[in-house]
Image (cartoon, helix red, strand yellow):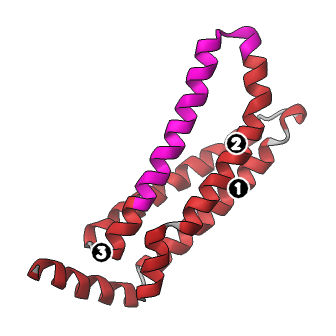
Amino acid sequence: MRRLFSTFAHGAPGVGLLLLRAAAAAALIAPAVHRAARSASDAGVVGSVLSAIDGLLLAVGLWIWMARMNGAGRKWARIVASVLFAINTVDLLITISQASAITAAEANAGVSIAVGVLVWLAGLGAIVLLWRGESSQYMTAASGKNAAA
């Protein structure tokens, strides 16, 4: 159990998948940025790209924070991680529903969806493990130590 939280706390799987998603998104964004730069101001395009990067960094930061808080036995962190996973689920469903509007020329967006599904599956695995009985026992024991300290 301690190894599970150690791995989760370091955030390696989730961060790795998020970085993979960022790389895929960057590869997919390049043509769109080029097209948008022709019709919009360069500042607006740069702002959109920076906004997307900020959102990704925020997501990575939140998951790492959740991993560390869960590893420390904070019971509230399981609930927050579950809410973040629910938000990720809604985001993935919206992305998939918008994929039907993608034209043949933008079919590379399927890569982004596939990576999004992998990230979602990693999150699902983490949530399932967080709510197992062994995790509850760990949380109870760790929160007892935190209260005594």
Please indicate whether residue 21 sits to the left or right of residue 108 in the image: left
The earlier-in-sequence mark between 1 and 3 is 3
**What amino acid is at disc 1?**
Val
Circle 2/circle 1 CB separation < 8 Å: yes
Position of the C terminus by quadrant: bottom left
Please name the residue that numbered disc 3 is placed on.
72
Q: Which residue is mark 1?
A: 115
Query: Where is mark 2, residue-wise?
Result: 25
Check disc 3 and give the amino acid type.
Ala
How many marks do you count on the picture? 3
Label 3: element kind: loop
Marks 1/3 in contact by CB < 8 Å: the verdict is no
Q: CA distance from mark 2 to mark 1?
A: 9 Å
Residue type at mark 2 is: Ala
The picture places residue 45, in percent across and down from the top left corner, at 63, 19
Crowdedness near tag 1: few (<14), some (14–19) or many (≥20) residues, C-alpha within 10 Å: some
